[in-house]
Image (cartoon, rainbow, N blue to C red):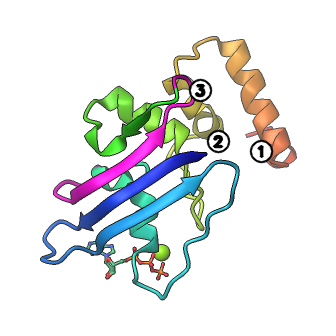
Amino acid sequence: MQVMNIKKFSFTYHGVEHPSLRDITLPIKKNKITALIGPSGCGKSTLLRSMNRIHDLYPGNKYDGKIELLNQVNGSMQNILDIKKENEFIELRQRVGMIFQKPTPFPMSTFDNVAYGLKISGLKNKTELADRVEQALKDGALWKEVHDR
Ligand SMILES: Nc1ncnc2c1ncn2[C@@H]1O[C@H](COP(=O)(O)OP(=O)(O)OP(=O)(O)O)[C@@H](O)[C@H]1O
Ligand SMILES: [Mg+2]
């Protein structure tokens, strides 16, 4: 089964004449590892950043074609390039996450960084937030280092 299906996808950076990606077609299978391999500058990061519309944090980039994402609840495929509403962007990025080579925490406390995702998902209960943050830091083997900060 496919969780993502990229169809005739092209991407052009703002102010650049030619597309950096042209006519990409790529099915992404469920529970399989898909690796992107290619020389520096061929567009691997550009494609990855398209998969959760992170490019949209900067204005003026152009997408063409389709990137369809499986809705696991009703089995339909949604073209994520149609997304326009802020809450849909948040939902997309909760489903399609990225782990960067270099960690880039937000300029706020460790607690607020870890709690950020839970808060934008609507979790307000302070005790539950504290418990979840503690558990996440323990799972990440960071608790001992940061618990008193
Ligand atoms: N913000 C940007 N504005 C304009 N062009 C860009 C931008 N970012 C990347 N590019 C160009 O897009 C093309 C693809 O770059 P990309 O970073 O996706 O390659 P990559 O395959 O991830 O390379 P590497 O293996 O070095 O990480 C390159 O020609 C690059 O110069
Ligand atoms: Mg790269």
Q: Nearer the viewer, residue 74 or 128?
A: 74
Residues rendered magenta in the picture: 57-74
Question: Which residue is at a point 31% across and 31% down the rendered structure image?
Answer: 86
Q: Is residue 92 left or right of residue 37?
A: left
Asked if the magenta segment contains residue 65, the reply would be: yes
Q: Earlier in the sequence, mark 3 or mark 2?
A: 2
Q: Amino acid at mark 2?
A: Thr
Question: Which residue is at a point 72% across and 31% down the rendered structure image?
Answer: 133
Q: Relative to 110, does residue 132 appear above or below in the rendering?
A: above
Q: Which residue is mark 2?
A: 110
Q: Is residue 14 left or right of residue 85?
A: left
Circles 3 and 2 in contact, beta carbons < 8 Å: no
- Of badges 3 and 2, the one in the foreground is 3
- Where, by quadrant of the figure, is residue 78 drawn? top left
- Where, by quadrant of the figure, is residue 104 drawn? bottom right
Residue 102 % position (x, y)? 58, 66
Q: Amino acid at mark 1?
A: Val
Asked if the magenta segment contains residue 111, the reply would be: no
Q: Nearer the viewer, residue 26 or 13?
A: 26
Residue 22 % position (x, y)? 28, 72
The label on residue 130 is: none
Q: CA distance from mark 3 to mark 2?
A: 14 Å
Residue 45 % position (x, y)? 45, 69
Q: Which residue is mark 1?
A: 146
Q: Earlier in the sequence, mark 1 or mark 2?
A: 2
Q: Which residue is mark 3?
A: 118
Circles 1 and 2 in contact, beta carbons < 8 Å: yes
Disc 2 element:
helix
Q: Relative to 72, does residue 125 appear above or below in the rendering?
A: above
